[in-house]
Image (spheres, coloured by chain):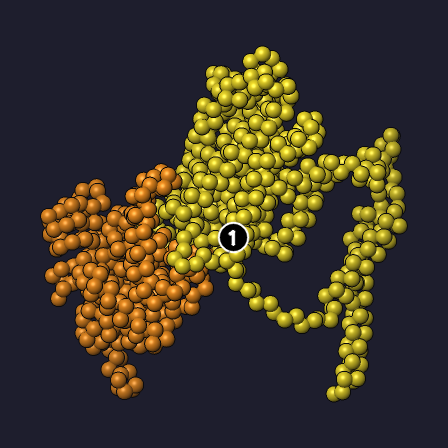
Chain colours: A orange, B yellow
Amino acid sequence: MRWQTNPLLTVEHLSMRFGGLVAVNDLSFQAGRGDITALIGPNGAGKTTVFNCVTGFYKPTEGRLALAREGVAAQADIEALTRAPSRSVKTQSGELFLLERMPGHEIAWRAKVARTFQNIRLFQGMTVLENLLVAHHNPLMLASGFTVLGVLGAPSYRAREAEAIERAKYWLDKIGLIDRADDPAGELPYGAQRRLEIARAMCTDPILLCLDEPAAGLNPRESADLNTLLNAIRDTHNTSILLIEHDMSVVMQISDHIVVLDYGIKISDGTPKEVRDDPKVIAAYLGVADEEVESVEAEIGA
Amino acid sequence: MTVEAQKLATAGAVGAGTATMVKDAFLAALLTFGLCFPVVLFHAESDNDGNLYLIPRPLLVAIMCGLVFVGRLSVSLYQARPKVDRPTVVAAPKPASLRYLNRYISLVGLVFLFAFPIVTLWWLGPAGSLKWINNYGVQILIYVMLGWGLNIVVGLAGLLDLGYVAFYAVGAYSYALLATTFGLSFWICLPLAGILSAFWGIILGFPVLRLRGDYLAIVTLAFGEIIRMILINWVPVTGGYAGIASIPKVTFFGIPFADAPGGFADTFGLEYSPIHRTIFLFYLILCLALLTNFVTMRLRRLPIGRAWEALREDEIACRSLGINTRNTKLTAFALGALFGGFAGSFFSVRQGFVSPESFTFIESATILAIVVLGGMGSQIGVALAAVVMIGGTEILREMEWTKQIFGAEFDPAQYRMLIFGMGMVIMMVLRPRGLVSTREPSIFLKEKKAVSGDLVKEGHG
């Protein structure tokens, strides 16, 4: 199993408490490099909370989130970094990050983790092209000499900007929105907005792309297109995907690895087939105690 | 149903409607009477001995009730007017020639501004043109510049700043103090004043930029007042209410505008006139304002400007794309403050005198009103709004003929705020997104299309 032999993200003992409410309780899982890992579970299971912890929007109450940008990180390196006060370290196998110590924008820029949102968060009053260029903020900021060279109109900045536009065009082509590049993002139909949000996240060149319910509100055709897009992202862009999804047709078809949460606790973890047959998962989705699963299954003819 | 019957039915409905309207208006008048009854009907007055008299004023109450009755009735009648089905006009796409027209207008405006002092001088002579160049030209341009400066903070970054005048004050006092204490020239003080203002912008920004929306607005408002309080109370440095007087006046790159040998007129072989200084001040503020505009337009097309606008649209999405929102907000604050400082320093070199009274909250409110009225984020809109608001005030001062109608004691300028208030309300009903409500994209692939104001967010701090 790739997530055990070559994990990109290792989540250990993650807990998130809001006052008395325990949203995530002692969760440990791994996301493999080059895998599509799905995080599923009934409503309120704590999936989005896990996402917010991974992408730095929440600071976890407890736990460690280690991300190895390249190669397999040695356990000793992770332990050493945990004891050290720093956020990241360069090891022999590549850079290693502890995400729980980093603010959201650093996670996106340094650790290269991008995300989309459950309720689409595009810059609605900006054009499609502008949306994608905002995703190039940090490299363009450096190229513009923190604005100084840019104001003077330096050629080096112009070249870098042209490169960013080319990159944006590539993605627009890929998601089929090249003809609408100059339209405001808020005017796009819902499905196109979802695709644009994914393209925008991809413009930050992430190694881990976190998608929060990418298929929500899509029709079957659009969902099938989404599957193709996600597979293409994984196969050709060296980007692993972590996704939350309720649409089982998407989850079962494209995931390599599924983690199931219920009430903030991991109840199952494995390949799609393993998870599908796990009585605990069936119980969580159907809402009965473990002992009654068989009788309920018999009743509904599953 | 025949046409006749239909007409009859409509007439009947109208008749019934009129009866309800009259009843409604009568109720409104009755309510007015109830409200007026003790407060307006009896006017309390005391004589010299301190005895209180109640003077009944039934006529006044009757007039008020009558006005409400008539007003309410006419509103109802207006609302119930037969509706004409107007064909919905589909906005035709803007032809390319119109876009060239836009550019043409800016060019004409620029030529007009540069020619303005010379033309007025030639036309009205030195004495007559002073008012136009100084009261209209320079005064309006100061507010155009302030509006453009605040536009970076409010219009682009979407941070509501109610204390912008603080940076104007810091700039003005910086020049006043540096020039009177160390005898530094205006050209050295101008950047220093800007830097000091920007520095104060950052100092304010650090603690408050975690706040959003209304909370941010209140803290910036408080900051504006704190600066003013410091100016009033730190008497040894700022002179308190007395302010700082005899600030060195502006010189033509070292040549004073004086009626003396070696003065401007003498050097260039002209006849001395105080108008020379005013014209120089006009060009100075024009250049400063254009600098503000140029920098803002440039920055909009750079990653920092796009990040400001993205921040206004959605702060959380910005963070997920690796934008350091705190630093981005700080740059917007500092840059807005920088231009406020430039304008302040110009203010004190023009007046030759600064006091805390010039930097009250109403100034902040005026500048903000210019930005909101102009259309947040639009450079041309802000300039137009400044012309309307500040030019409007000046015109009110000139309306001598109103004295013939309302009596010699009538001062139309006193009604400035009332008129602006009404203007604002009308604007917000008719054009809620300001004079220029569309957003111009910073970059385009094939065709530049203006973004409708309905999609653009106002920002939440």
* Residue B12 in view: yes
**On screen, A294 above or below B310?**
below
The chain letter under disc 1 is B
Residue lying furthest front = B269
B451 and B131: which one is in front? B131
How packed is label 1: few (under 14 Cα within 10 Å), some, or many (20 or more)? Answer: few
Residue drawn at (74%, 68%), measured in percent from left and top?
Answer: B81
Q: Give the residue drawn at x 74%, y 36%.
A: B398
Q: How many marks?
A: 1
> Could you tell me which quadrant the N terminus of chain B lies in?
bottom right
The one nearer the camera, A279 or B394, is: B394
Q: Residue furthest top?
A: B261
Amino acid type of the residue that numbered disc 1 sits on in the rendered structure: Tyr
Give me the residue at 43% from left, 56% from top.
A126
**Residue B328 on image: x %, y %:** 39, 43
**How far from the left and from the top, in percent, is residue B253?**
50, 21
Q: Is residue A244 left or right of residue B215?
A: left
Which of A145/B217 is in front?
Answer: A145
Question: In the visual, does A26 lie left or right of B81?
Answer: left
* Residue A212 at least partly seen: no
Residue B356 shown left or right of residue B439 in the figure: right
Relative to B203, A67 lies left or right: left
Q: Report which residue position mark 1 lands on.
A: B100
Helix, strand, or loop for circle 1?
A: helix
- Figure check: B16 above or below B319: below
Residue located at (45% from left, 53% from top): B441
Q: Position of residue A92 (x, y in %)?
A: 10, 48
Residue B168 in percent (x, y) is at: 53, 32
